[in-house]
Image (tube, coloured by chain):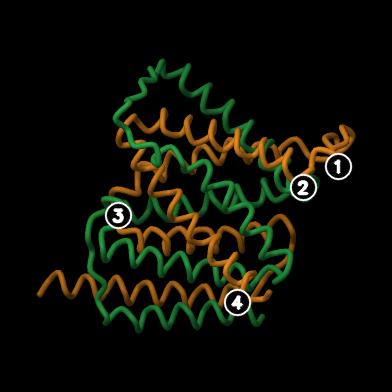
């Protein structure tokens, strides 16, 4: 079973890259805003189908909506910004760089959110993150050197 | 500039994960997915109306290009399965490893019409440094 869980973890990574590329291809064909709209329509329909098939619908109670802070619902809007901007950037940069740069940006802002909002500082994440940045810098340096030769 | 925008997307991603994560704390995964998609749907409709963008669908557009939304729900399912059984750190590290390797393959072979960028074996040292950093993150 462990193998299947590891495979699922890998699947979550692969689908992120795949969706990003396919989205940007659609955006090239029909426009960035239009492509984003399609993404949300399809995502919404599939989520609703899964919702009913998985029998999650029987677990819903209205009172739970009140326990979620209003600001949390703005995540969906932030998601639109992410998709619009990644549709712009995906054709302009190598998939490898994009993956790593997004990770680094996400990591350090994640550390900042943990620190300022949740009041915890993860030293391991910080030190590990610095190594990730060092690794990426080295790769960028290799590219720069090759380009000059 | 492109590098900076990419970093910024990552930064915005973190805010999104924090907000959506708060929603997911209160709801099951598909319910959260419906809520998040509905808010995003309303937002993009508002942007389309404000910019008076016209939508024209081209019959020649291959069907698989419409599948990103479906694949996105796949990401939700996969992460839920792995987080449920493996905890937080391990799926994160494996997910990033899979993203990195898959991206290198896509660049190297120019899959899905992307520009071909061959992988330079000299970059392996950089990858090892990164893997080391991720191991530190997991152990801590």
Q: Give x and y (percent) for residue B90.
A: 63, 73
Residue linked to disc 3: A93
For the residue carrying disc 4, how many other residues have a C-alpha within 10 Å: few (<14), some (14-19), or many (20+)?
A: many
| Chain of residue at mark 4 | B
Please identify which colour was used for chain A in the image: orange
| Chain of residue at mark 2 | B
C-alpha gap between disc 2 and disc 1: 8 Å
Q: Give x and y (percent) for residue A144.
A: 21, 70
Q: From the viewer's perspective, is A147 left or right of A142?
A: left
Contact, mark 2 vs mark 3 (Cβ under 8 Å): no
Q: From the viewer's perspective, is A80 left or right of B88?
A: left
Which callout, 1 or 3, points at the residue further toward the start of the chain? Answer: 1
Please identify which colour was used for chain B in the image: green
| Chain of residue at mark 3 | A
C-alpha gap between disc 1 and disc 3: 43 Å
Residue linked to disc 1: A59
Q: Nearer the viewer, residue A17 or B112?
A: B112
What residue is drawn where x is 22% and y is 60%?
A: B116
Residue linked to disc 2: B28
Q: Give x and y (percent) for residue B82.
A: 66, 65
Residue linked to disc 4: B137
| SS at mark 3 in the image | loop
Both on one chain, marks 4 and 3? no
Which of labels 2 and 4 is toward the front?
Answer: 2
C-alpha gap between disc 2 and disc 3: 36 Å
For the residue carrying disc 3, how many other residues have a C-alpha within 10 Å: few (<14), some (14-19), or many (20+)?
A: some
Q: From the viewer's perspective, is A9 left or right of A72?
A: left
C-alpha gap between disc 1 and disc 4: 36 Å
């Amino acid at each position: 079973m462990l193998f299947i869980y590891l495979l699922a973890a890998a699947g979550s990574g692969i689908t992120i890259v795949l969706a990003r590329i396919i989205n940007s291809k659609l955006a090239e064909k029909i426009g960035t805003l239009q492509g984003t709209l399609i993404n949300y329509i399809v995502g919404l329909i599939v989520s609703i189908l899964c919702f009913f098939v998985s029998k999650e619908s029987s677990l819903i109670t209205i009172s739970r909506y009140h326990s979620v802070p209003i600001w949390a619902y703005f995540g969906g809007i932030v998601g639109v910004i992410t998709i619009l901007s990644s549709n712009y950037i995906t054709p302009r940069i190598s998939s490898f760089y994009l993956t790593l740069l997004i990770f680094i940006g996400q990591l350090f802002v994640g550390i900042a959110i943990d620190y300022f909002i949740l009041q915890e500082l993860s030293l391991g994440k910080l030190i590990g993150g610095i190594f990730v940045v060092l690794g990426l810098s080295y790769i960028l340096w290799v590219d720069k050197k090759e380009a000059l030769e | 500039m492109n590098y900076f925008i990419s970093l910024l997307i990552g930064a915005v991603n973190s805010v999104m994960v924090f907000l959506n994560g708060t929603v997911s704390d209160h709801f099951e995964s598909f319910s959260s997915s419906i809520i998040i998609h509905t808010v995003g749907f309303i937002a993009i409709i508002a942007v389309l109306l404000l910019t008076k963008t016209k939508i024209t669908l081209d019959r020649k557009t291959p069907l698989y290009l419409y599948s990103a939304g479906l694949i996105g729900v796949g990401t939700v399912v996969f992460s839920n399965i792995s987080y449920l059984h493996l905890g937080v750190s391990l799926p994160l590290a494996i997910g990033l490893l899979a993203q990195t390797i898959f991206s290198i393959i896509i660049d190297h072979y120019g899959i899905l019409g992307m520009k071909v960028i061959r992988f330079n074996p000299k970059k392996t040292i950089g990858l090892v440094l990164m893997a080391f950093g991720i191991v530190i993150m997991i152990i801590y």
